[in-house]
Image (spheres, grey):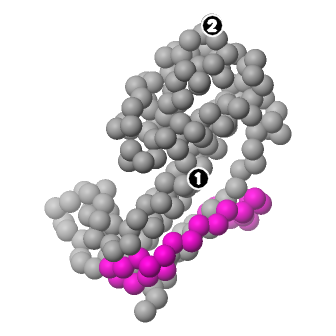
Amino acid sequence: MPATIYPKLCEATESIVFWLPSESRTPFELVEANNLRADVSLRENVLLRPDCFISPRGQGGASTWLNLSTVDGGIAAFIGQVLDLTVKVMRTSAPSQDRSMQAERSHAIDQLDGRRHLSDALEHLLTSAYRWGLEAILRSKLSERPELLPAKTWPILELVGRPGRLRSVRLVSVRDKPLHIPTASVSKVA
C-alpha cells in the first residue's frame, strides 16, 4: 500500500465512525480482531488508533498491507479491471514471459508517462472502497440504521491517452446504482 494513501484511509475511518452515535460500544469481534479496548466506545478507540481497521491484525503504520476484508469487493474488482485494461491498451512493449501477472502489470504501469493521474484516481477509488466496506462491517456489527451513514456512490472513470502516455484521467461518482456491475473500458486517442 503506498504511504500516500495511509492518511486518507485513517481520515475515512474517522469520518465513518463520526456518523455513528458517539456512545456506540466497540463490538467484541472487533476488539479481538483489531486489538482494540473493550472498555471504551468505538469512537474513542478510533480516536486513539485511527488505523485500527486498515491493516491486518491491527498492526498499523504507513508501510503496511491493506486489510482487504474492509474493502468493498465490487470497487476493488473495478480497480483491477482498470489496471488490466490500461496495461492492455497503453503498454508500449510485449509482456515478459518470466514475470508474474502482478509484476508485469506493475512494470507496464511504471513505463507510462502520466501514470500519476491514474495513481491519484485509483487512490481515491480505493479510499472509497475502504469507506464503503468499513461502513458495511460496522453497520452489521452495530445493527445501525443505514440512514445514519453517508450514501454510497459508483465510479465512472475515463482515461485519455495513447500507448506510453496517459494524458488525463477523469473520475466521476454517481449516486444511483448502475443497472449493471461497474466495468472498465479504455479507448486509445491519437
The residue range painted magenta reads 160-182
Q: Quadrant of residue 136?
A: top right
Residue 54 in view: yes
Residue 172 magenta-highlighted: yes
**Label 2 belongs to which residue?**
39
Q: Residue at x 64, y 66 (%)?
A: 172
Residue that lies at the very extreme toward the top in this rendered image: 39
Q: Can you say whether 92 is above or below 141 in the image? A: below
The quadrant of the picture occupied by the C terminus is bottom left
Q: Residues within 10 Å of mark 2 (few under 14, many from 20)?
A: few
Indicate which label's residue lies in the foreground, 2 or 1. 2
- Whether tag 2 and tag 1 are in contact, CB under 8 A, the answer is no
Residue 76 in view: no
Q: Residues within 10 Å of mark 1 (few under 14, many from 20)?
A: some
The quadrant of the picture occupied by the N terminus is top left
Residue 3 percent across, percent down from the top left: 38, 44
Q: Quadrant of residue 150?
A: top right
Q: Quadrant of residue 180?
A: bottom right
Residue 112 magenta-highlighted: no
What is the number of the mark on residue 74?
1
Q: Is residue 52 left or right of residue 28?
A: left
Q: Is residue 153 left or right of residue 6?
A: right
Q: Can you say whether 42 is above or below 145 in the image? A: above
Rounded to the nearest angstrom, the CA distance separating label 2 from label 1 is 35 Å
SS state under label 1:
helix
Q: Can you say whether 165 is above or below 81 in the image? A: below
SS state under label 2:
loop
Q: Which mark sits nearer the N-terminus, 2 or 1?
A: 2
Q: Amino acid at mark 1?
A: Gly
Q: Residue at x 28, y 79 (%)?
A: 92
Q: Residue at x 33, y 66 (%)?
A: 109
